[in-house]
């Protein structure tokens, strides 16, 4: 099955990013502007050379991204023009003027700004606070490999320089408020037709995702296979979810003829919770398929000390509880699709095994967090393509899925 994952150029013409200075982030009656060390010449590649002020301003959506599902938005305008347009003897100096609103009032020095222009001309003014891991994640989404500087760095999108969007990219787009439109909708609808408007067990969806991607073999590249299966299953789930949610909305939210606000909120929360829960189970299902493809002995959800249940024990339950079995040949792996600052939860799991392994799909975890993992003897495992969102120093320490398989296979062979 030929999967087209969609592209950033389907949504944006370009994006610029910079780290905010104190002056940038301080709005007062005289100044609400974003400066640029290059006098606006760099950001001009995104916003163009046409002055935008007064009645010709950019329509804008202001977005504050602090953490997962902690987003504040405001609609408004942005002005973009040469502040020296009436001084022809001086070099042009373009500036971006913003409005005071709930988002800009939260801005602070050191926060990261992303200015992304959509195909319809609307500009997203995205602010990520300096302590948030989302800085690295949004940077990775837009293709910026380094932490932003005080001068704008830009990227323009076209079919020639654009990479495909995988399911991790889609989750970040969700945070920004961009609804992903799957280019494979028709073929996916054919695959999920059997389910009608009923969600199947996650294991059934995972099996179907692998079955309908016969060209993907984990033995060729386990990192590529894992992402391909997850991407395909996520696409199938979103298409089925769209049907189910549409049917529920069409039936309305009424209680004795009045708007059922509580019912609407509960339904919305159930949609979000289902997405999170399903992704975690899907991740484990496809990891198990990878281990099976390489004949790696393992057991899942083994109850160990104090009722703790690590996701995977290698080579399995019997070996773990055999006091004569050598500890260096035992391995535990926790799987968290998104670990954030919850990774310490795995430390009490499988107490007999001193080193913990954690596999995640989360891009761009902060250096502070990975340093803390090292200090607690936790080895982070990240699919190779997501590993590109980490710093060079982090990448030297990270393991890919293939790296993990090599170590576990060697231990079992011994």
Image (cartoon, helix red, strand yellow):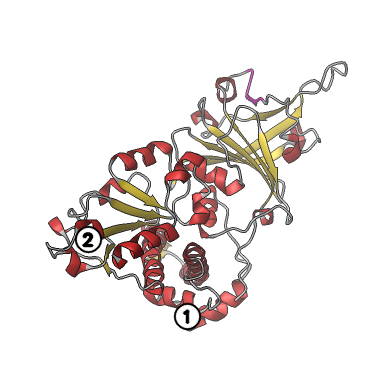
> Within 10 Å of the Cα at label 2, are there few (<14), some (14-19), or many (20+) other Cα atoms?
some
Which residue, as the protein is rendered here, is positioned at the far bottom? 194
Question: Which marked residue is nearer to the observer: mark 1 or mark 2?
Answer: 2
Residue 65 part of the magenta segment: no
Any mark on residue 196, and which?
Answer: 1
Residue 35 disc label: none
Q: What stretch is highlighted in magenta?
A: 30-35
In this picture, residue 61 sits left or right of residue 48: left
Q: Inspect this view and state whether residue 201 appears.
A: no
Q: Is residue 152 visible?
A: yes
Q: Which percent across, then down, holds residue 69?
A: 43, 48
Q: Is residue 41 left or right of residue 315?
A: right
Relative height, residue 16 to residue 167 (above, below): above
Please state which of residues 263 and 100 is positioned toward the viewer in this rendering: 100
Question: Is 163 drawn above or below residue 104 in the view shown?
Answer: below
Q: Residue at x 53, y 55 (%)?
A: 385
Instruction: Tell me which residue sits at (17%, 63%) in the image.
Output: 325
Residue 309 tag number: 2
Q: Relative to 281, say whether 193 is above or below.
A: below
Spatial CA distance of label 1 from label 2 is: 35 Å
> Picture quarter containing residue 308?
bottom left
Q: Quadrant of the C terminus?
A: bottom left
Which image quadrant: the N terminus? bottom right
């Amino acid at each position: 099955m030929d999967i087209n994952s969609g592209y950033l150029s389907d949504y944006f013409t370009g994006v610029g990013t910079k780290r905010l200075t104190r002056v940038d982030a301080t709005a007062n009656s005289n100044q609400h502007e974003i400066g640029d060390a290059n006098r606006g010449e760099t950001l001009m590649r995104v916003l163009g050379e046409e002055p935008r002020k007064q009645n010709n301003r950019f329509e804008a959506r202001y977005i504050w991204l602090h953490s997962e599902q902690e987003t504040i938005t405001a609609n408004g305008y942005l002005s973009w023009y040469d502040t020296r347009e009436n001084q022809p003897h001086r070099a042009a100096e373009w500036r971006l003027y913003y409005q005071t609103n709930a988002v800009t009032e939260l801005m602070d020095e050191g926060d990261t700004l992303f200015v992304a222009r959509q195909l319809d001309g609307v500009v997203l003014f995205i602010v990520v606070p300096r302590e948030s891991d989302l800085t690295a994640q949004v940077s990775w989404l837009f293709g910026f490999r380094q932490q932003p500087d005080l001068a704008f760095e830009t990227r323009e999108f076209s079919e020639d320089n654009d990479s495909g969007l995988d399911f991790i990219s889609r989750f970040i787009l969700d945070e920004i408020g961009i609804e992903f439109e799957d280019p494979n909708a028709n073929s996916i609808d054919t695959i999920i037709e059997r389910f009608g408007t009923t969600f199947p067990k996650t294991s059934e969806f995972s099996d179907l995702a692998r079955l309908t991607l016969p060209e993907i073999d984990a033995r060729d590249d386990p990192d590529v296979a894992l992402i391909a299966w997850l991407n395909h299953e996520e696409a199938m789930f979103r298409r089925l979810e769209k049907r189910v949610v549409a049917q529920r909305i069409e039936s309305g939210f009424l209680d004795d003829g009045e708007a059922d606000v509580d019912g609407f909120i509960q339904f919305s929360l159930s949609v979000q919770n289902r997405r999170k829960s399903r992704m975690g189970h899907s991740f484990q299902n496809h990891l198990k398929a990878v281990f099976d493809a390489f004949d790696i002995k393992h057991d899942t959800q083994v109850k160990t000390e104090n009722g703790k249940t690590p996701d995977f024990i290698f080579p399995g339950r019997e070996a773990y509880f055999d006091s004569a079995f050598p500890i260096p040949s035992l391995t535990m792996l926790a799987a968290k699709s998104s670990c954030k600052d919850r990774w310490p939860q795995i430390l009490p799991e499988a107490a007999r095994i001193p080193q913990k392994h954690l596999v995640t799909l989360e891009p761009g975890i902060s250096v502070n967090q990975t340093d803390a993992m090292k200090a607690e003897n936790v080895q982070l495992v990240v699919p190779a393509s997501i590993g590109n969102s980490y710093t060079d120093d982090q990448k030297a320490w990270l393991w890919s899925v293939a790296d993990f398989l090599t170590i576990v296979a060697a231990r079992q062979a011994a």
